[in-house]
């Protein structure tokens, strides 16, 4: 049957301008069903309404709100209004679908709409504009729907909710596992930067390890030669209140060990090469999610080479880092650090990925709309620096553990993606009549419709007869 035949009415909301001052009667906004549930904390308000306006636009328990004008991904989202509060339907973005409960239950219709949205049925009948799409009410009413007998509708809804509850419990467990892996990743970094995983290895290789203090002296001499008169002696670190370090380690600032390069590149004066902006670098894991082309940018950029460490200084709490696997250019909101034979660049990748470093950068960023951390501040961050060979050992341990975490996270990602497919499959079976057994004692939907139509005609005859009696 047609959707319109299962509804008492389809309507838009009141068009008066709403306020956010909690004055008057609450009215819906598109955000009211943003999570496919009614959220009465996300409403607007209208004051000075007449009694007839309130009556006309008031939502009733069992009404379905339908996202009528939105992006394709949100078009057709629905939620059932199951409250007794005075809330009015507002504007054109949401439609009110009022089911005829003698024919169809709100819950059955709501799940059917969810299924149709997943299947793309609403997008297929929509009118598409640049930023949003909309559905004509006539087209919506003419959508064909599968109608089950009312008792079967109840069984279908009950089974869907039972299966969805189990799925949601599984999703919650998967999300908790994902969070635990995130915490474990940070625990690995913290332990590594404290020297705990290399404790026994350090004892076994004591004779091979050059103390980090000598490493630091060598970096200092290298800088003196490179900078000449521009070289500035770093401030002396007061270690009196700092914790003891493993043997061979030394306290140092970032600025004493590693500094950014300043090589620039003009996109218009070079052949096409890879371009990395902050949007191309993932958060918290040292990986890229995509890359751009130098053809898409115009202004001067930073040059980087394979093996360089890229660090996003804009909004440092996003924790965007990457060791380049190719030459290219990057945004000037990305610092570029080159590798050096006196330290391991990957050690600093892991050092920067740790939450204590992220907190330091976040607490010391400047700017309101575009907060950044500059190198002068970054250079003051204090680290426990291990000998070079131990840096390499730490990298080996962390890399292996992170590889295992990556495998588990990929598995979790796949499991989460399966849940959407499973829900779709459940809905598909439900509206094909395959989810629950059919009961021969149920009044067939066709007979139900015929009976309702017959009763409706009889009611009209009685009304007409009543009018004639009054006329006499």
Image: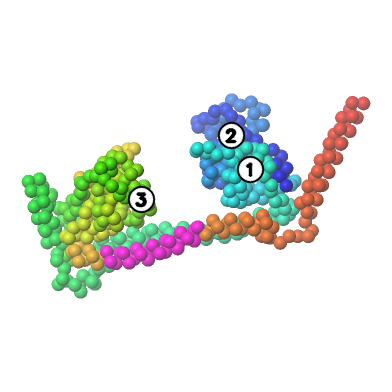
Predominant secondary structure in magenta? helix
Residue 160 at x, y percent in the picture: 63, 56
Real-space Cα distance between discs 3 and 2?
A: 39 Å
Whichever of callouts 1 and 2 sits on the residue coming sooner in the sequence is 1
| Of labels 1 and 2, the one closer to you | 2
Determine which residue is flagged by label 2: 92
**Mark 3 residue element:** loop
What residue is shown at x 11% (from left), y 58% (from top)? Answer: 217
Real-space Cα distance between discs 1 and 2?
A: 15 Å
Badge 2: how crowded within 10 Å, few (<14), some, or many (20+)?
Answer: some
State if disc 2 and disc 1 touch (CB < 8 Å). no
Determine which residue is flagged by label 1: 64
**What quarter of the picture does the C terminus occupy?**
top right
Real-space Cα distance between discs 1 and 3?
A: 43 Å
What residue is shown at x 18% (from left), y 64% (from top)? Answer: 387
Q: Which of 40 and 300 is in front in this view?
A: 300
Determine which residue is flagged by label 3: 291
State if disc 2 and disc 3 touch (CB < 8 Å). no
Magenta stretch bounds: 395-417
Is 434 positioned to the left or the right of 166 in the image?
Answer: right
Where is residue 138, by image quadrant?
A: top right
Q: In the image as oriented, which residue stretches furthest toward the left? A: 229
Q: Is residue 379 above or below residue 370?
A: below
Q: In the image as oriented, which residue stretches furthest toward the bottom? A: 204
């Amino acid at each position: 049957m047609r959707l319109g035949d299962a509804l008492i009415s389809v309507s838009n909301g009141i068009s008066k301008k709403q306020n956010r001052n909690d004055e008057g009667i609450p009215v819906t906004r598109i955000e009211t069903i943003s999570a496919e549930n009614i959220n009465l904390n996300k409403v607007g308000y209208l004051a000075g309404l007449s009694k007839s306006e309130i009556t006309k636009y008031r939502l009733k328990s069992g009404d379905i709100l339908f996202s009528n004008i939105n992006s394709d991904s949100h078009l057709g989202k629905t939620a059932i209004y199951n409250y007794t509060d005075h809330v009015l339907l507002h504007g054109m973005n949401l439609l009110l679908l009022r089911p005829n409960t003698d024919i169809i239950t709100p819950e059955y219709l709501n799940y059917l709409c969810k299924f149709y949205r997943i299947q793309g049925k609403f997008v297929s009948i929509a009118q598409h504009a640049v930023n949003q799409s909309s559905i004509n009410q006539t087209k919506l009413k003419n959508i064909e729907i599968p109608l089950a007998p009312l008792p079967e509708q109840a069984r279908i809804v009950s089974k869907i909710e039972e299966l969805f509850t189990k799925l949601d419990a599984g999703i919650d467990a998967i999300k908790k596992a994902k969070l635990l892996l995130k915490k474990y990743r940070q625990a690995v970094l913290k332990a590594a930067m404290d020297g705990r995983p290399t404790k026994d290895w350090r004892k076994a290789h004591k004779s091979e390890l050059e103390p980090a203090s000598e490493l630091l002296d060598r970096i200092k001499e290298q800088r003196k030669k490179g900078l000449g008169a521009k070289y500035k002696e770093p401030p002396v670190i007061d270690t009196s209140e700092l914790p003891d370090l493993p043997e061979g380690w030394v306290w140092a600032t970032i600025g004493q060990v590693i500094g950014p390069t300043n090589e620039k590149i003009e996109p218009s004066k070079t052949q096409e090469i890879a371009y990395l902006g902050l949007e191309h670098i993932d958060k918290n894991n040292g990986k890229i999610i995509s890359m751009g082309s130098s053809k898409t940018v115009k202004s001067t950029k930073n040059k980087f080479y394979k093996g360089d460490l890229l660090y996003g200084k804009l909004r440092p709490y996003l924790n965007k880092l990457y060791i380049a696997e190719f030459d290219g250019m990057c945004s000037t909101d990305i610092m570029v650090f080159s590798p050096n034979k006196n330290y391991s660049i990957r050690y600093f990748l892991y050092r920067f990925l740790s939450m204590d470093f992220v907190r330091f950068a976040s607490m010391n960023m400047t700017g309101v709309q575009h907060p950044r951390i500059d190198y002068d501040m970054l250079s003051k961050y204090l680290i426990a620096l291990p000998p070079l060979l131990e840096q390499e050992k730490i990298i080996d341990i962390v890399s292996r553990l992170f590889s295992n975490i990556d495998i588990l996270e990929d598995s979790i990602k796949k499991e989460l993606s399966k849940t959407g497919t499973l829900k779709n499959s459940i809905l598909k079976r439900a509206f094909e009549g395959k989810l629950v057994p059919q009961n021969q004692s149920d009044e067939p939907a066709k007979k139900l419709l015929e009976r309702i139509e017959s009763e409706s005609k009889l009611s009209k005859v009685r009304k007409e007869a009543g009018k004639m009696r009054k006329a006499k």
